Image (cartoon, helix red, strand yellow):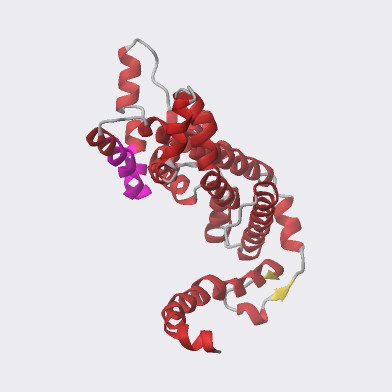
Amino acid sequence: MRTLKKEYILHLMLLPGVIVTLIYAYGPMAGLIMAFQQFEPLSGFFKSELVGLDNFRYVFNLPDFNQVLWNTVIISIFKMVLFLLVPLILALLLNEVTRRWFSRFIQSAIFLPFFLSWTVLGGVIIELFSLNGPVNSLITAFGMEPIMFMLDNEWFRGIIIGSDVWKGMGYNMIVMLAAITGINATLYEAAEVDGAGKWKQMIHITLPGMAPILILLAVLSLGGVLNAGFEQILIMYNPTVYEGADIIDTFVYRLGMFSQQFGPAAAVGLFKSVISLALVSLTYYAAYKYNNYRIF
């Protein structure tokens, strides 16, 4: 009680955030009951018929569900790996740049796309890779046939992954640069005295020093392994590339909003949430057990 009296102002400062979280994050979870109902909007939650696990059976037996799940996993894994690898390489390279003005310019240029919405970037990318866009103009200039990037499943999936990594890599790069600056400079001096070059310093000092932040980023990204980028794909894709780019979120959107199948859509959403929770729990436990790293 003494501690509470001393810190009550801090608790009051947290109260608005807690209330907003309860209303907008936990309140809507009551809607998960739709996953077990033959939900009718006019009947509401209390009068809609309970159907148990029928919605889950119906969704899992849909011919498109396995392909949608596969697309989600493939796109998410590639994004997750590249979201760590590309910023890490950029951070290591920029850390070796001695001219500060050049380093800041590169950081700003790479970080800029992070602030742009997919509404803007999606339109830019569609224009770049359209049949008459700059990319195809360059291809035809070399005497090759133009490629319909936005209508080809394999090309489109690569564009989705590459553009998302390009947009978000600046943020992780800044985080990793901050982790590098937090490493004790005397370690590098001692290694240099012992004859270690830049490569060995990176392997034995920089990367181990960055390990906690790399683990944190990996754990956070694994939690969203089934979040393959709803907004990005919804803006850029079309029925021609459903086979290679349709993911769980866009599948739920079409199932609920277009087909009016609210129960099956809620079932897919609940399935995704349970899997994500399990992955977050497992990765957090592994990070704590094998690297003695705790987020809290």
Pick the front one: 122 or 264:
122
Q: In the image shown, does 268 or 189 lie closer to the viewer? A: 189
Is residue 258 shown left or right of residue 284? left
Q: In this view, does 242 lie to the left or right of 144?
A: right
Q: How many marks?
A: 0
Rendered position, 120 above or below 109: below
Q: Is the magenta stretch mostly helix, strand or loop?
A: helix
87 is higher (above) or lower (below) than 30: above
Residue 107 location, quadrant: top left
Task: Kindly identify the residue that appears in the image at 53 percent across and 30 percent down.
Answer: 203
108 magenta-colored:
yes
The stretch of residues the image draws in magenta is 106-124
Q: Which of 183 and 279 is in front in this view?
A: 183
Decide if residue 240 is in sight here: no
x and y percent of residue 215 in the render?
A: 57, 46
Q: Where is residue 27 in the image (x, y as percent from the top left)?
A: 55, 76
Asked whether residue 72 appears in the rendered view, the answer is yes
* Above or below, comparing residue 293 to residue 170 in the picture: below
